[in-house]
Image (cartoon, rainbow, N blue to C red):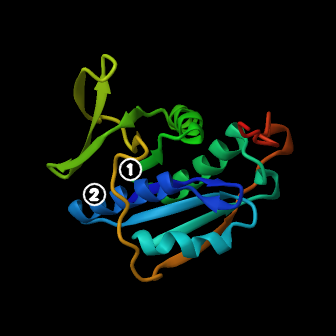
Amino acid sequence: MILIFIEVREGKVKKSSLEALSEGKRRADDLNTEANAVLVGHNLESLADEVLPYGASKVYVVENSLLSHYSAAGFSQALFSLVEDIKPEVILFSASSMGKDLAPRLAAKLGVSLASDCTRTIAKDGKLEVDRPIFAGKAFVTLRFKSSPIMATLRPNVFPLGEPGEKKGEVIRKEVVIPEDQIKAPALEILREK
């Protein structure tokens, strides 16, 4: 199973997350498995309907009132508990500011490798491989993973957004227990450039 983290900002699903889900669905089809999505936060169940048309078989809604605002420690702990429970083979994030902050923390908790800012994915010999730029984009490297689950962040605006289909799939709500003292430095406000 491929699990895709769906980023929510100001109550809206980010397009870059739907791009990651679309790519995850294409690779899941190649690998004869399913693509599932995960929303982390509080009161997000209504957003699952926006995610299902892009190919998710299941949308996990991981909730706790302490996750109302983004906190790298809280979100990574919530994702860690879900990953330990459902055991995905692949976990994908958008390489947005949140994805770049959250994915390495989850990889460290899981003790696995992470490929960042990937521009291509391919299913080869029943495994996922990724390409990412090196030397300031002058060359590309293809990575094959030895650790499991495979983790990668996908560069926004590179992977095509899939055509929305039917809103079919299962929404699974999971309450996660997070000690209040574990929520450090929550993002309380986003200041936009004027």
What residue do we see at 76% from left, 39% from top?
Answer: 191
Side of 182 where 80 appears, left or right: left
In the image, which disc is placed on residue 29?
Answer: none
Image coordinates for residue 12, horizontal then vertical, percent: 64, 61
Identify the element where label 1 is drawn.
strand
Image coordinates for residue 170, horizontal then vertical, percent: 51, 78
Q: Is residue 89 above or below residue 61?
A: above
Q: Nearer the viewer, residue 52 or 31?
A: 52
Quadrant where the image shows the C terminus: top right
What residue do we see at 40% from left, 47% from top?
Answer: 157
In the image, which disc is placed on residue 27?
Answer: 2
Quadrant where the image shows the N terminus: bottom left
Q: Nearer the viewer, residue 180 or 97?
A: 97
Q: Find disc 1 in the rendering and name its residue.
A: 90
What residue do we see at 55% from left, 60% from top?
Answer: 38
Q: Residue furthest left?
A: 125
